[in-house]
Amino acid sequence: MWTPFLALTASADLRSRHRVTRILHMDKPVNITASPNKTNIRLGVCQVARNNMSCLDWIVEEVKDKGTSMQPILIYCPTMKTVGKVFGYLKAELQSQAWVDGDPEHKIDNLLIGIFHSKTLPQNKDRVLSSLKGEGNCRVVVATTALGMGLNFPNVSHIVMFGAPGDLEAVVQQVGRAGRNGQQAHAIIYNTGHYFKVDKDLKELLSVFKKTCIRKFLYGHFETEPSHVEPGHQCCTFCHTVCSCSSGTCTEPTPNYEQITDQPVSLISRQVDEKNRSFIADLLNDYRSSLIKSSTHLYTSHAACTGFSTELVDSVLANCEHIFDLSYIMDNLLVFQLDHAKEILYIIADVFGDVDVDVQSDLDESFSDPDLYFSNYFDCDDFVDDAQRSHVSTSESDQ
């Protein structure tokens, strides 16, 4: 006598579904799926320089021009710290126009922008949620993935991913929060080049978006025959470039959120001979061996126990020409612990002698972990005022 059971998920790619059926020993299961491919959402990808938030200026102009008449925009960020930086930038750019009719009293209920993360104060969460349901003034929300789980906002016109999410499933989930009212909507990934904890499938998407249909690549991981959208300018960044909807050409202008010049990061490099590369390999493997000896190895792999895999060793050797600081290590290598990144930098410094370890060991604030239990990061006026003063000081120093 077999007991029937049901496995449910909101979004899972083909590989994950196969894994679930295998682990649960489901013999010839009946699959009931709904396509996540929403044809009313145009997909976009843009390469932007890290920490350059000018790509968000179109949102600033939208708020200034339309105020409460604009449709909601959600900006998803990978970390709470990035949420704070983006929110501070928008408020500094908007100045008094961040409030309805420039409210001189700066009442929180009249603020057109807001933040949402797991530690946001309850009253501020309520303000954001009620606004997204059409009962408040907040029109732009900067958030982590804490916003969206189990929630339905029908009128969101744009999803902005400032920094790549962790994987394609996260992309699909965030994209799916736009256009639920059936109207034309847009989703854009601003690739800042920060690949820490980004899986290989998403990295591939971010590297081929100018050469292939983003929609087919993305949803090809979730269904066997994904379709693109016609006309091409309503499909994705790539399809817009090859669209021929008007007598062999396309007269539809590039969306304002994509009118950004790609900003690749120029790399400095050094010459590395095989002797130095072999020396680096020896030092990395010695460090890895020391981690293995000090760890309790049960049924998991050495890589799982230590976080320092042979693949990481290989990636260091493949990229050692360009390793001069922690930023490069954290952005481009499969490093999951800051201590490992520092040790890699020390090894590079020992071998080549061209890295200022004293400066690099004094970590930039972008590598410090936020206190997840301190909710005043983004909820107090002091934080906002500091962000404004910092922005004004930077602007004055540039003049």
Image: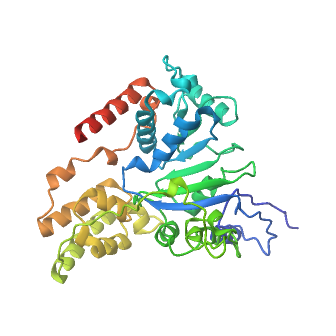
**Residue 89 at x, y = what percent?**
41, 39
Residue at the extreme bottom: 274
Q: Residue at x 79, y 68 (%)?
A: 31
Q: Is residue 111 visible?
A: yes
Residue with the most extreme right position: 1
> Which quadrant, please, contains the N terminus?
bottom right
Residue at image point 58% right, 58% down: 171
Residue 224 located left or right of residue 394: right
**Colour convention:** rainbow
* Direction left: furthest residue: 353
Q: Which residue is farthest front?
A: 247
> Which quarter of the image is occupied by the C terminus?
top left
All told, the count of numbered labels is 0
Q: Position of residue 201 (x, y in %)?
A: 52, 69
Residue drawn 23% across and 38% down?
A: 397
Front in this rendered view, residue 99 or 194: 99
Where residue 374 sits, quadrant-wise, is top left
Which percent across, then down, holds residue 365? Answer: 30, 44
**Residue 19 coordinates in the image, percent (x, y):** 65, 70
Question: Is 41 displayed left or right of 261 in the figure?
Answer: right
Q: Quadrant of residue 348?
A: bottom left
Q: Is residue 286 visible?
A: no
> Between residues 361 and 145, which one lies in front from this camera angle?
145
The one of 289 and 212 positioned closer to us in this rendering: 212
Front-lying residue, 95 or 370: 95
Rendering quarter of residue 320:
bottom left
Residue found at x 26% / y 35% = 396
